[in-house]
Structure formats: structure tokens, C-alpha cells
Image (cartoon, rainbow, N blue to C red):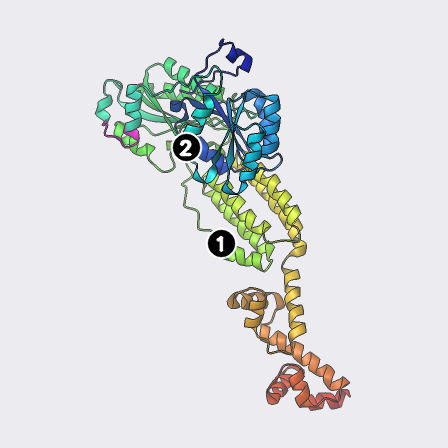
Amino acid sequence: MIYNLGAFTLEERERGKIMENTCRIMVIDDEFIMRQGIRFMMRWEEEGYEIVGEASNGKEALALLPQMIPHIILCDIAMPVMNGLDFIKIVNKEYPDIKLVVLSSYDNFEYVREALVNGAVDYVLKPTLNPEELLKILSRTAEKIPGLQLGRKKSSGIEKKMEDFFFGGEGRGRDFRDAFPYSCYRLFVLPLGYRNQSGVDVSPVLYEKTEVFFKKLGHCRYLKFLHRQETMCVVLNYGRKDEDEIIEALENFLEEAYLLSERVIGILGERHMHLEELREEFREPRFLEHEAFYNRGIHLFKKQDMICVRQPVEKFDFRKFTSSIAVRKYHEAISLFREYIRNAVRNQMQEMKLKNQSKNLLYNIIGSSEEHLEELEDIRREYFLKMEETLYCDDFLKVFEEMLERLEGILDNTGENLYLGKMLGYIQQHFAEDLNLQDLAEEFNFSYSYLSVYFNQHVSEGFSEYLNNIRIQKACEFLVKTRMSISQISSAVGYADQSYFCRVFKRITGKTPSTYRRENW
């Protein structure tokens, strides 16, 4: 069980008035994946710990501290807005009873040393982070906290047996006959990682309210277990005639839970007659995915009512995307980006994957433009946070489209036309040389085939024809303004073969070089 024991002052602990057996932990890191990795790293409550909150930078964490008052803070050093060093200095001064453990990479050990000088009690290397090492460091740190005695909490016997049954243990459905006297089974799943509008983690309160609800629910037996410390799974056993009443009670309960956080949503599986069937449903790849993102306003999501049949999202054409960026065809790259994300939303890609994919593709666009690097970095910081904080799909798409409009506005002036101009300028300067499309491709770091298509699309004629027109135009100037021979002019504009030069000249101008000179002299 997750317990919310409240926050106590150092003075109270030292006087021995309060003894706590759950160590509250806060995680601060600008990488969402890192924070999630720590949260799911182990069964925290079984070790006597509780993750009460998380933040993406020092400033955000300071705003949350008065409500959370953790015992221990795991804090990254390199973060935007407010870095870990500045944060540690403030916390050490204003919250001296809170213990700080630094999350560090190999290359910032000097910062670690400074953090330890300014109040951090220990550090852990992120590249080698594992449950055993982290527990060892947390245990050392927890021993320094007055009034804290870690109490490890294990599941009750039958609940542990049920958990093992669902996660591949040796148990069988008939082993639970004494606990489940009714004929019908359903699985109810309640994700717990919710915060209220103030950013406070409401998981402990939600857990306890859910337990109270099921204890009072009539005509129903249940057993519960936690999945990855973040999801409450409840096996319901009831008679068929009581099903509608039980579902209605669940809906009413979740409507009340909505007051804790608007994202609260329960997932109700299909009815089964055997526990083995329930276990198979639980193991379906998408069963435990968070459904609230695509279902605004729904409190109880019933699997049998699901209309949308999710299809695998087509693989993103990353090669075409990066090629478009390379030649500064930003409009094309952004269009590919937009269509992919819209398709991902239509097929209800998992929320975390959707947001991470969006960030990854944005990184590629931002890294390609040195001219507007600062502006683009501002967009990255602003919209990475906005996308991460969106609760629902429609809100995410609004933020996403707003971000793309900002990108297009900045990149329009540095797009493909400017890049094309550089290529055409290069041809103007080097037309007299033995120039070919392969040379141009190597000069501008393109593939031959891609540049061939690109040139035809943007110049309305092939490279060879464009080069010939430039050369013949220059030859016309030589014929009229100089006394150079035809042979000399041919060589001067890039043709080693005079007869070939004359054939090209006549095809383009309709006249031989001699006739053109005589008529325009």
C-alpha cells in the first residue's frame, strides 16, 4: 500500500514525537525518460520508500517543495531554467533537513564535487544506475534522517499469490476458489501517476480512496496488486445479476475521483468465466496503456466499448525527412513531420512514445539551422515542456501545430530558395571548368540521385541544360565584345570540343557562332 504520512519538521523528528517508516523521495531531472526510469526501477513501497513528486528543473521543484517536503531529493546537475547546483544551495539553506543526492554523468564530476561542498550528501552515476546501487545509496542517506525507520511492506499472502499468477507464476485459477465464490471475473485497472492542478501527486490519496471503495462494494469479492508501483490492478469476482450495479458504482466512484485530478480514468476489462482468460487479457500489449490521453471526459473506459481499432503506425520516412532538411526544404520536412504525427494520433500511438517521437524529430530540424540557433532553442525549451504537460490528445495537437507554425515562420527565410541560390551562384562562378552534377553533389554534400531530382524540381530544367545555357550566354558576350576566335571562346566557356560547342550554340540560339557574331557585331 502507498501511504501518505504527511510532512514533519526536523524539530518534531528530533524530539521523537513522530516516527516515520516511509521515506519520501522527489526526483528532479530535465529528461522525462530518466524520471520515468527511476519511478519504474523497483517496487518502492516494498523497500520502504515513496516517490512523492518529480520536476524537470530546479525552479519547478522549488515551487513544489512546500507541499511535498520529501526526505530525500534525487537531483540532476545539468538542467535548464535552474541547474542542480543553484537548486542545492537554496534547498540547503531553506530546507536543511532535506537530504540531496546528485544524479551525475561521467563528464561533470567537477560539478559533483561542488554539489557535495554545497550540501549534497552523496551522488550516483546515471550511466550505471541500477536498483541495487540506488537502494544502497538511499539506505545510507535514510540512516541520517532523525525519526525515520524504514518499514518494508510486502503484499499479503493471497495478494502476492494473485500477483505471481498474473506475472507468470505457477499458480492456477482454481487455487483461488475460496476467495472467489462467484461466476464472473473482470479486471479493473487504475493508473496512479496523477497530479492535481498544483502539481501535487495525488496517488496516495487515490489509492486509499480506492481501497475504501472496494471494501464497501457489496455483492463483489476482490483481490488487488500493484503493477510497477504505478498501476493498481483489481480482480473483481461477482454474480452476473450484479454486474450493472457494480459498473454503475465504479462510474460514480471515478466521477468523484475526478475532483482529485481531471486525468483520473479507470480501465475495465471484459467479462470472463475463468481466471486464466482474465490473465490472458491482462497480458495483451495495450491493456495497461494509459487511456485518458485519447478519452477526455471519460471516467470509466470499458474495453468492450472500444470502437477505434488501433493500427500500427507506418514507419516514418526518416531518410526523406533528413534529406529535405539537408537541402533546407524545411516546408517539405515539416509537412512530413506533421503528417506522421497526425497519423500517429489517428492510430492512438501510446502517449509517451508520441511525445518522444515529436521531440526527436524537432531536434533534427533545430540542429540544421545555425542562422537561427538561439530562436530555435527557445522553441525547443518552450514546446518540449508544453507537449510534456498536455493531458489530452486534442491539447497536444494544438501545441504541436502552434510549434510548427513558429518553426515555419523562422525557417522560411533560410529555406530551400536560399540554398538553391548558393548552388546556382556556384555554377555561375565555375561554369568554365569541367563541371558536372557529381561535382556539384559532392560540393554541397548531396547524393547524385537526390540532387538530380531536386534540380529538375526547382530550376524547371536539368543540370546539363542549365549549364549549357550559362555557357552559351557567356559565349554570346565573347562573340560580340571580343576578337577571340571561336576555338578560344569554346575553351573559355568550358567546351573542350569546338564542334560540340558549335552544335550546342546553334541548338540554343538557332544560329552558328559565326553568324551570331556577324549579325551582332
Asked if residue 426 is positioned above or below residue 185 in the image, the reply reads below
- Residue 170 falls within the magenta-colored stretch: yes
Asked if residue 212 is positioned above or below residue 378 in the image, the reply reads above
| Position of residue 486 measured from the top left corner of the image (x, y, whole percent) | 68, 89
| Image side of residue 416 versus residue 192, left or right | right
Q: Which residue was labeled with disc 2?
A: 133
Asked if residue 235 is positioned above or below residue 435 in the image, the reply reads above
Tell which of 128 and 299 is nearer to you. Answer: 128
Report the predominant secondary structure element of the magenta stretch: loop
Q: CB of mark 2 within 8 Å of CB of mark 1?
A: no
Q: Amino acid at mark 1?
A: Phe
Q: Amino acid at mark 2?
A: Glu
Q: Is residue 245 visible?
A: yes
Work out how far the residue at label 2 is from the one at label 1, CA to CA, in angstroms. 38 Å
| Position of residue 81 measured from the top left corner of the image (x, y, whole percent) | 62, 36
Snapshot quadrant of residue 309: top left
| Image side of residue 33 versus residue 380, left or right | left
How busy is the neighbourhood of tag 2: few (under 14 within 10 Å), some, or many (20 plus)?
few
Q: Quadrant of the C terminus?
A: bottom right
Tell which of 408 and 11 is nearer to you. Answer: 11
| Image side of residue 111 versus residue 371, left or right | left
| Residue at (38% x, 17% y) in the render | 214
Asked if residue 488 is positioned above or below residue 248 in the image, the reply reads below
| Residue at (28% x, 19% y) in the render | 157
Magenta range: 165-172
Determine whether the residue tagged by mark 1 lies in a helix, strand or loop.
helix
Closest to the camera, between mark 2 and mark 1, is: 2
